[in-house]
Image (cartoon, helix red, strand yellow):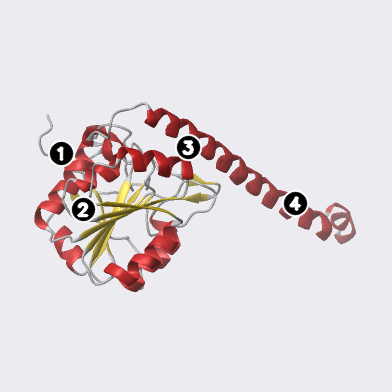
Amino acid sequence: MSGVFSRWAIPAASRGLGQQLRKLYFHLFSFRRDILARLNVLEDAFAALATPPPDHSAALNCQAVRQRVVESIFATAPIRCVIETGTYTGTSTAFFAKFGVPVHSCELSPALFYVAHQRLAVHENVHLYLADSRAMLRELARQVAGEFCFFYLDAHWYADLPLGDEIRIIQEHWHDFIAMIDDFEVPGDPGYGYDRYGRRRLNYDYIADLITPSGLDVRFPCVPSSEETGARRGYVFLSAGMGALALADNQLLTAYKATDGSSRGRRGLKHRRAIGTA
């Protein structure tokens, strides 16, 4: 019988070829996504040139509940600085500028950087950088590492996903911070959209190894997506020090706790009705 089965066994060379073809497929998928993303960037940049300055209602993917979450944080927490990765056309940047603290924002696309620079010229507290998010964070670490900062991480758009490096840099240089990650899967609520990059998904499992050793506080929106407006993109808050204390009593967020060490990111969240909604 062993001889019969050996004739049908897949040769090692064929298995290796299959693995190479799978790697090539995922590489081409990422390349295609990258090209489409860059074309979308140019389209959005030209469209933004013909629009008036950013309207605060369009910030954070036009999500009214998320805007209230951020406003409630700034109303109670002594945040000294905002650091945004991924300016895009500057709509959310203008929203952060209204809080009166310095806003540092970087954009990798020259076209979008130019558009944002034009649209945000009226905001004297906004500082724009044409740079990779990791480079900007390292530069700002030498300038404002001792300050209580609010981070908005939204630079995950191209094939290169900098989120992991961004989290590492923030944890290494800041002790008091709040970081909001956009396009993130909200456990138990599929109505919130999130990003996928081939086999990678922006979810708790993707960042668990980065945040578990340091014990960062993790909070998700407790308002269901059905009560959110706009694009209904998911998000998560990571915080430490004064940031964790500031979010502890926020009624629009709920702390995330994994059921066990091996199945992190699968537990549903208890939802509450949004304040001010019917």
At a point 39% along the width and 67% down the height, the residue shown is 138
Instruction: Answer whether labels 2 and 4 touch (C-beta < 8 Å).
Output: no
- Quarter of the image with the C terminus is top left
Report the amino acid beneath label 4.
Answer: Gly
Q: Can residue 160 be seen from the camera position used here?
A: yes
Residue 212: image location, x then y, percent: 35, 69
**Which residue is more in the foreground, 270 or 273?**
273
Q: Earlier in the sequence, mark 1 or mark 3?
A: 3
Vertical position of residue 30 compared to residue 191: above or below = below
| Distance of label 4 from label 1 (alpha carbons) | 50 Å
Q: Which numbered disc flags the more N-terminal residue, 4 or 1?
A: 4
Q: Residue at x 43, y 34 (%)?
A: 45
Q: Earlier in the sequence, mark 2 or mark 4?
A: 4
Q: Earlier in the sequence, mark 4 or mark 3?
A: 4
Which residue bears the numbered disc 1? 274
Q: Which residue is mark 3?
A: 41
Q: Amino acid at mark 3?
A: Val
Q: Label 3 near label 2: C-beta < 8 Å?
A: no
Quadrant holding the N terminus: bottom right
* Disc assigned to residue 18: 4
Asked whether the beta carbons under mark 4 and mark 1 sit within 8 Å of each other, the answer is no
Instruction: State how far apart marks 2 and 3 are (Cα).
Output: 34 Å
